[in-house]
Image (cartoon, grey):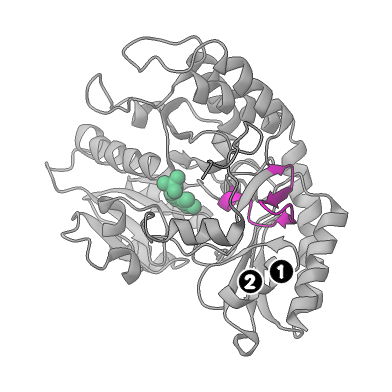
Amino acid sequence: MTAPVRTQDSPETRGSEELIRAEEPVLAHNYHPLPVVVSRAEGTWVEDVEGRRYLDMLAGYSALNFGHRHPALIEAAHRQLDRLTLTSRAFHNDRLAEFAERLAALTGMDMVLPMNTGAEAVESGVKVARKWAYDVKGVPADRATIVVAADNFHGRTTTIVSFSTDETARQGFGPFTPGFRIVPYNDLAALEAAVDETTAAVLIEPIQGEAGVIIPDDGYLAGVRELTRRKGCLFVADEIQSGLGRTGSTLAVEHESVVPDVVLLGKALGGGIVPVSAVVGRREVLGVLHPGEHGSTFGGNPLAAAVGTAVVELLETGDFQRRATELGAILRDGLTGLVGKGVVGFRSRGLWAGVDIDPALGTGREISERLMREGILAKDTHGSTIRLAPPLTITAEELEGALGSLEKVLR
Ligand SMILES: *Cc1c(COP(=O)(O)O)cnc(C)c1O
């Protein structure tokens, strides 16, 4: 038997079903993907190994805010690949200064701590907040607490699942890291009661993404800001999914004109090319770190910095934020028209929506599978909720097409 011919253009010769079957015995089952095998993508469209095309209405959970293979990002990556990819932080590299300067300017913060994945940014935020509590606030050693919200999603490390309320994410992974207090989201009175002299920080998502795009009441984020300032603790906003244009502004906290002490970024910061995350914050907070106290081999590598800088450059124009606002109005109108026609309710801000489907019509998974057969890729979050988060490069026609497909699937 001769081996199948592999070319650089088509390194795999097996079809979708065969590839899905091949994964089964060798790939850990920590995901249950939709049965589509993507082999290439451009802009808002992906193509499977059989050449079927799909509109991407998930955009890598917002890691693809600028679409697949945005030309400016691909060019920045190619240019950097040909010059320098990794130095480690043992040495300086010539791309990191500009990345940090421009990211700090974009977010209105003083300092940047570059990391790789979102979970690392959260871990780093937790460490920095604790160190600030001991070094600046004067909390007794090992007594610092961090107040978080129920139904949060901040990532998958052992410390992060320690303050998750999702039993599936926790079961079997203890013992857990102490020092966290969980209060209901969108409840200022509960937050007030939980914050005390040991509190280093309040850590929340300005909009809870994985929970189903849960948008707090007007005034909640401003209330968190006022409360944390008055009580003398930090406000850490996890904008890993909500940030970088998704909601119509660079950061979701801008909708309430709120400036946190620390903002966590990830996902779209890597332009859909490499994992890039960052903790950005005030000098008083990030300034607590000294050499050797925290680090990452890959954090701030020149390839990540080049791509991250190109991402910041796209956001500096304001075009993507504007698109998210304008197209978000189309998304909202379309979904409003589907309420009572299979949609029981929805929440949206910018190009981001959590759509609750009538459970009688199927689970979120079943609706996602039906959408897939209509050429739309989306993903359920919990139960019968579908999350829609297309690339911010989507056109009005494409968005209307997706809404039409949703209407068809619900009929
Ligand atoms: C995705 C996400 C994370 C974790 O990011 P990873 O890159 O998957 O580790 C953390 N916080 C929020 C709000 C997220 O959406």
The residue positioned farthest toward the bottom in the image shown? 360
* Residue on which the image places disc 1: 373
Q: Residue 32: x and y, percent?
A: 47, 65
Image height check: is 58 above or below 248? below
Quadrant, the C terminus: bottom right
Find out whether the residues at labels 1 and 2 contact each other: C-beta distance under 8 Å.
yes
Is residue 185 shown to the viewer in this render? yes
Instruction: Give amino acid for label 2.
Output: Glu
Q: SS at mark 2? A: helix
For the point 82% across and 76% down, which residue is it?
337
Q: Residue 56: x and y, percent?
A: 69, 54
* Residue on which the image places disc 2: 369
Asked if the stretch drawn in magenta spans residue 49, the answer is yes
Asked if the stretch drawn in magenta spans residue 45, the answer is yes
Q: SS at mark 1? A: helix
Q: Quadrant of residue 70?
A: top right
The residue positioned farthest toward the right in the image shown? 397
Q: Is residue 305 left or right of residue 286?
A: right
Please tell me how many numbered marks the rendered image carries.
Answer: 2
Label 1 CA crowd tier, 10 Å (few <14, some 14–19, many 20+): some
Label 2 CA crowd tier, 10 Å (few <14, some 14–19, many 20+): many
Q: Quadrant of residue 195?
A: bottom left
Q: Residue 84: x and y, percent?
A: 50, 12
For the point 60% across and 38% down, which residue is it?
5
Is residue 225 shown to the viewer in this render? no
The residue positioned farthest toward the left in the image shown? 141
For the point 19% across and 58% down, which residue is it?
176
Q: Which residues are magenta?
A: 41-62
Q: Is mark 2 within 8 Å of ligand 1?
A: no
Q: Residue 353: x and y, percent?
A: 65, 63
